[in-house]
Amino acid sequence: MQNLLQKYKPTIGIEIHCQLATKTKLFCRCARETSSELEPNQHTCEVCLGLPGALPRINEHAVWQAIRFATAAKSSVSKQSFFMRKQYFYPDLPKGYQITQLTHPIGMGGSIELPSGGSVLLDRVQIEEDAGKILHKGKSSLVDLNRAGTPLIEIVSAPDMHSIDEALEYVKTVYRLVRFHKISDANMEKGNFRMDLNISLSPVNSKELGVRCEIKNVNSFRFAEKAINYEMLRQFQILEENQKIKQQTRGYDPDSDTTFPMRDKEDAHDYRYFDDPDLPVLDCGSQLKMDLDLEVDPIEAEKNLIKAGLNQETTTYFTESKANFNYLKECQKNLKNSKNLGKLAAFFMTEIKSNKEQDQNLEIFELFDPSKLAEIFNLVDGGVLSSKTAKKAADLYYKNKGLAILDIAKANGLIQVQDESKIKEVIQDVLDKNPKQLEEYRAGKTKLKGFFVGQIMKVSSGNFSPSLVQKILDKLLNA
Ligand SMILES: [Zn+2]
């Protein structure tokens, strides 16, 4: 790779096919559902089967979702957008053409800001329908059209990336965006977030792009990394042998981590695109006036949470979905001292998220009332609860939802004792019961202080204010 980078500049452009989160398919009312429990072809009708005479009708929600992505990606939303037919034959495409966009896509241009700085330019965002699936069984091949006609957005980047790291950061950022805004479930295992990777090499001093190869349908970040790496090295070897790169569509084989040729790459004119006569021009103006629900940018939110003192893992969790983010916001709203947000978030990760893992069906808001979580931290801040008793209070609240935290704390003796004379009494008692250790301490074995603290904590069940215990113990030990 070192040799390669000395002589050549890699250029990467990526097309992401991302299934939109809608109830129904793009042009019919069949459910958009691709669960493995479905019978093959269960969710099909005359439209998605491509029967003659059946007419498509656009799913408004899919258009809204596509506009949301385009807006989040600062792509300029076309006021008038329309669909075209891309002709090709494939057994899982019964119409013989795919309804897609070309000249007037839903979004033009735009960019994705990367968390590490910099950005990747977008060429366009377009809406299109997905094809079905072919299942190979023994000698026969079967066609399942449950997926045929499900709505996709194709997010086409400019050839704007020049390293594997940058390409990976880009696809991961897009993935986070679509999941955070619930534009897509982006379930990679189900294939509803797939990447086509366009890779070329050009001599370092050349301004012209090299001949590109496209690796189709990569559906994991790890595979994307390996595929780009392999493809760069493959092209390097060809160029080093003074051969020419052939413009090609290639596949990626995860078993051998290699790419293989599928077909020579077609150009747009090969598909004989023309305007779809069955679908009217999309007037996006009215959609743009609707609430796009994009107030929070997860990448920006991440930066702010890090600034507020949350660590990376905690930040990633709270910016993974809008629900998680809103939960933390709700905690913050109820927190008297905003400086405690980092502590609260860390407490959530260690003490409460584990419950979530056990009670998988619970939504974050059902798991633990955010105002109660803030209340616990307000009590810790006021010295009423210690961090140790805070855990107990949270645990008891989890089991007895609906009770006030302070009531739980009082009923279970969790209130931190602040009464100096009472603490002094207990400490004196501990010292009296351990005369040998006290003598040794006073003779210079100061390590024994820890022993006394341990004894005091045991007697007090951890309910004494630690700072008061330290202060009084020091006084009595050195008396
Ligand atoms: Zn249908």
Image: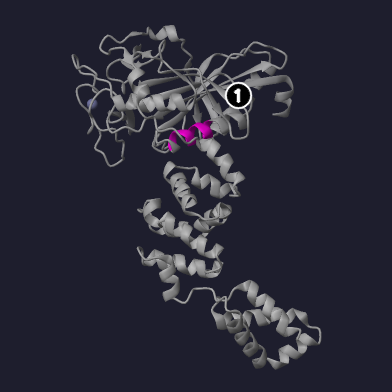
Residue at x 44% of width, y 45% of height: 326
Percent coordinates x, y for residue 13 in the rendering: 55, 21
- In the picture, the quarter occupied by the N terminus is top right
Check the image and report above or below for 400 versus 349: below
Look at the image and say whether residue 2 sits in the magenta stretch: no
- The answer to which of 438 and 271 lies nearer the viewer is 438
Percent coordinates x, y for residue 465 in the rendering: 59, 73
- In the picture, the quarter occupied by the C terminus is bottom right
Percent coordinates x, y for residue 270 in the rendering: 42, 8
Q: Does the residue labelled 1 lie within 8 Å of ligand 1?
A: no
- Write down the region rendered in magenta: 171-179
Quadrant of the displayed image that contains ligand 1? top left
- The answer to which of 200 and 445 lies nearer the viewer is 445
User: Does residue 431 appear anywhere in the picture?
Assistant: yes
Residue at x 68% of width, y 81% of height: 473
Check the image and report above or below for 274 versus 413: above
Horizontal side of residue 379 vs 8, given as left or right: left
Residue topped by disc 1: 161
Horizontal side of residue 223 vs 456, given as left or right: left
Residue at x 40% of width, y 51% of height: 364
